[in-house]
Image (cartoon, grey):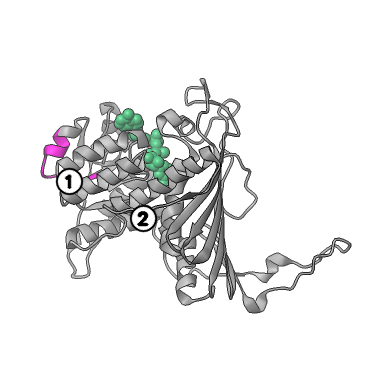
Amino acid sequence: MNGVSGRMGYRQHLLRSILAIRDEGGIELSDGSRITVRPLLVGRSEAKLAEIAQRHGIADYTTDLDAALADPQWEIYADFLVTKARATALRKAIAAGKTIYTEKPTAESVDEALELARLASEAGVKTGVVHDKLYLPGLQKLRRLIESGFFGRILSVRGEFGYWVFEGDWQPAQRPSWNYRTEDGGGIIVDMFPHWNYILENLFGPVRSVYAQASTHIPDRWDENGTPYRATAEDAAYGIFELDGDIVAQINSSWTVRVNRDELVEFHVDGTHGSAVVGLFGAKLQGRNLTPKPVWNLDLADEHDYAADWAEVPTNDVFRNGFRQQWHEFLESYVLGTDYPFDLLAGARGVQLAEAGLESAREGRKVELAELGL
Ligand SMILES: NC(=O)c1ccc[n+]([C@@H]2O[C@H](COP(=O)([O-])OP(=O)(O)OC[C@H]3O[C@@H](n4cnc5c(N)ncnc54)[C@H](O)[C@@H]3O)[C@@H](O)[C@H]2O)c1
């Protein structure tokens, strides 16, 4: 596990996923057998690794990635590094014949992301890329609504993602400063468009084109040490995505908005027979028979309570942490040797959408997406 001192590496992948699985005695397969996990922590700072290892009763840690990759007892290489450091490490792990599980984005350019997917395929290496948002309770409820036919024909999706990230002077920022520097792999497009890609393609249909407007609304920020720096990456992106089936998705991504919604991300889906608004956890819907008939009249205050026309979708399932659930599925697929859909090629499609979004923003035009293949 490379990068376990980071936000995602530590909290989501180590604590919530691998240690949770370890502490429950592994994962039970349908034939009654168990997959157990034993993490090896990899990083640059021996002191940090030793501290994490000690805190969680982990026996193995090292600052020598090459030696770890050369050691056959470690079967899976998992990568949670800053985006900029990822491709080099993945390349090494693929060359060492390890199974790969990695955070997104898988690389900084689509060429590099595709090359990694190709190398893995040629080496016969199984790969998995984090698709965590698909496992959110709200999005799983949405999937069920779609599969039940609730929407009729889906027309459009409007996504609103974001919150205020403090500038770092009068209150410390709650995201790492590299997120705001293009030269360090930052920017909200590179960060969020890979998520939008797998959400859109898995729930609605493949993305065929993108138009994005990128803005750096806040040009000056303060880093982890309180030192001022210039934000060179966009902190907001306003995107329009055309999907198969004539579905239009419009998603705002912003670290410069104050939240006035139920959750930090919400998707509003309109279909001919019904609509839904889903967040991380919640989901509410309105069927065609509950749809009010507003009349546009500026002379009369509208007394209708539009919020009351929506019904909450019940939580009929127990939802695990999404990162952990995906780890379960990946480990099971690895042990049983089954196909795994969220591989490096899927990851490359996410990078492709981010790259196309940046190109669109730079050139002020809609960018079509070519179908990616190995
Ligand atoms: N799936 C998600 O929802 C989600 C959310 C946030 C971030 N991410 C992705 O996870 C990755 C890590 O993000 P984070 O927010 O945890 O970042 P972070 O800065 O908290 O952690 C990054 C890790 O990389 C290590 N690192 C930094 N520079 C390095 C270098 N040059 N060489 C080797 N190691 C280096 C750090 O020591 C740390 O362990 C990013 O690729 C990011 O895009 C995914």
Q: Which mark is residue 98?
A: 1
Above or below, 23 relative to 173: below
Residue under the point 25% across and 28% down = 46
The three-letter amino acid code for the residue at tag 2 is Glu
Magenta stretch holds residue 113: no
Q: Name the residue that disc number 2 marks.
A: 371
Q: CA distance from mark 1 to mark 2?
A: 28 Å
Above or below, 205 relative to 93: below
- Left or right: 298 in relation to 213: right
- Left or right: 196 in relation to 86: right
What residue range appears in magenta? 67-77
Q: Position of residue 357 (x, y in %)?
A: 48, 45
Front residue of this view, candidates 271 and 283: 271
Q: Which mark is residue 269?
A: none
Q: Is residue 26 visible?
A: no
Residue under the point 57% across and 53% down = 263
Q: Position of residue 197 (x, y in %)?
A: 43, 53
Q: Position of residue 173 (x, y in %)?
A: 53, 32
Nearest to viewer (mark 1 / mark 2): 2
- Left or right: 199 in relation to 2: right
Placement of the N terminus among the 4 image quadrants: top left
Residue under the point 35% across and 34% down = 84
The three-letter amino acid code for the residue at tag 1 is Lys
Extreme residue toward the bottom, this view: 289
Local secondary structure at mark 2 = loop
Where ligand 1 lies, by image quadrant? top left
Other-residue count near label 2 (Cα within 10 Å), few / some / many at <14 / 14–19 / ≥20:
few
Front residue of this view, candidates 37 and 304: 304
